[in-house]
Image (cartoon, rainbow, N blue to C red):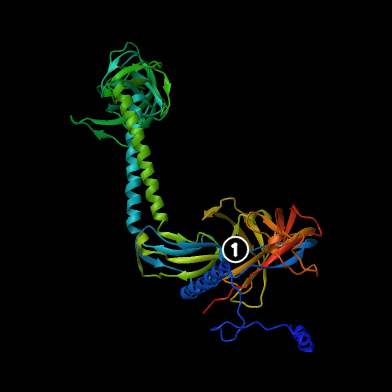
Amino acid sequence: MEEKHMQEERLPETAKPEKKKRLPGFGGKKRRKWTIPAVVLLAAALLGSQMWKLRGETVPQAVLYEAEPVQRRDLGVTVTGSATLEPADAYQVGTLVSGTILSAPFEEDQQVEKDTLLYTLDSGSAQDSVARANISVEQARLSYQQALEAKNPTAPISGILNEVYVHDGDSVSAGTALAKIVASTDLTIDFLFTYASPDQFYVGQAATVFIGNFDGTVQGTVVSVSDDTSVTANGKQSCTVRVKLANPGIVSDSFTASAVIGSYSSYGNAPVSMAASAVVYASGSGTVSGFSKLSGSTVTKGEQLCTVDSESIRSQLATAKLTVESAQLSAGTAASAVDDYTIRSPIAGTVIEKNCKAGDKVDGASSGTLAVIYDLSYLKMEMNVNELDIGKVRPGQAVEITAAALPGQTFTGTVERVSVNGTTTSGFTTYPVTIVLEEYGDLKPGMNVSATILGDTAEQVLSVPVSAVNRGNTVLVAGPGVLGEDGATVVDSSKAEERPVTLGRSDAAYIEITNGLAEGDTVLVPVQPTETVG
């Protein structure tokens, strides 16, 4: 413009173009030529600008782009996130029982092993319940044994079946005698001899015994002689001699006998004494079966003699068995309740809190937490990873961890577990990744930390800036007319080609393109500064 003006000044006066006259009312200024569409657009722009100002919002600006060549580079695949540190394990010690704390032999910050005694509570009432439950068990067992005995009568002593009163098929009622058992077949009889002194007899001396109305005699042996003489009721001097003999048959203690020893005959008849004996009675009503032993057979204590069966006996036995089982369960529950009065550490760790002491009274669950124990052998964190990045994470990967509370320090952890139990919110799914820190220095549970999971390195892969990828996995590729003469400046982004691409691995800045672009292509990367209009 300036050069043109100078050329005009060098022209002769006659060669200068005639100046156009100004129309009145325009103050001598040069009139611009406006078209109607241009006026409308300008007015709309001014109106829109004023509306954004009135709303106090950012005035939208045109998107600016810069060119970026598609090239190969190494990508350090990483996944970043944040989480809160937790101990390896934590346990809040509580109780479901009530009572007074008798002892609490531990302190805060103390290291405890698993099953270390923490609290002992007064268990007096629980011990009483155990005693009552055990008594109930014994009573139930006795009732069961009686019901079992009613069905299967047994020998109360070892010995000989002296008498059998029933046979198979007989119907009996409770209290019916079934058999008699004697401990031995030997009989003992104490004979009284008048007008004889003890020195007339001796142990081992033969004796001839006459029993009841039996014909014939039985030979016996003197086993004892009284030390002195005595006087009978009729005033006669006498001595006592005990004779032992084998039972010649079915002699019982209802018989009497007399004897001749040497030249002396016993005075009157003496009662026969038998060894210990027992009568077996039916405990219930039913039909006898299985009585196979005969009189004179040998039996042992506890040996089943027969079976007395009936519906009532079977029902009684089943009920008694259930009663035993129920009593045993109650006793076990009572014993477990006593164990609840002794509270031990469920894990090995450090005591973080001690909220009760000896002498305090606790009232079950309403007492809250009695103590808190942390396992600080390592720290862990659970970081939520976006579904787009979860494929880059696997157990064993190293993790760099920093905390705002410890500026300048970096810690190293390890991915322990990648969960498949995702959580979807507003259309996006995240998956929990557990990270473990074995060496955590001054880090503490509860600290908020940032983590960078270090994945594999993708070597020399075709890649573009992450910001070049648009929604729907497309990029703008520079074609003819997009770039200026320098080949780097974007002069007309409207001529760019929107091209779909297939994405691969990525780091914080670049992402791999596995399909859709070639090395040497140029993509447009948006740079859109935002200003707030006051």
Q: Nearer the viewer, residue 64 or 323?
A: 64
In this rendering, the count of numbered labels is 1
In the picture shown, does residue 472 fall above or below 452? above
For this view, does 249 lie left or right of residue 499? Answer: left
* Nearer the observer, 170 or 435: 435
> Residue at left 45%, top 62%?
93
44 w.r.t. 15: above or below: above
Q: Give how far across and how far down residue 23 sits, in percent.
A: 57, 82
In the rendered image, residue 500, in percent from the top left (x then y), is placed at 69, 52
Occupied quadrant, residue 86: bottom right
Report x, y in % for residue 360. Answer: 36, 69
Mark 1 residue crowding within 10 angstroms, few (<14) / some (14–19) / many (20+): many
Disc 1 residue type? Lys
User: Which residue is the site of mark 1?
Assistant: 380
Report the residue that reaches farthest toward the left: 234
- At which x and y percent is residue 77? 72, 61
Farthest residue toward the front? 14
Could you tell me which secondary element the residue under label 1 belongs to? strand
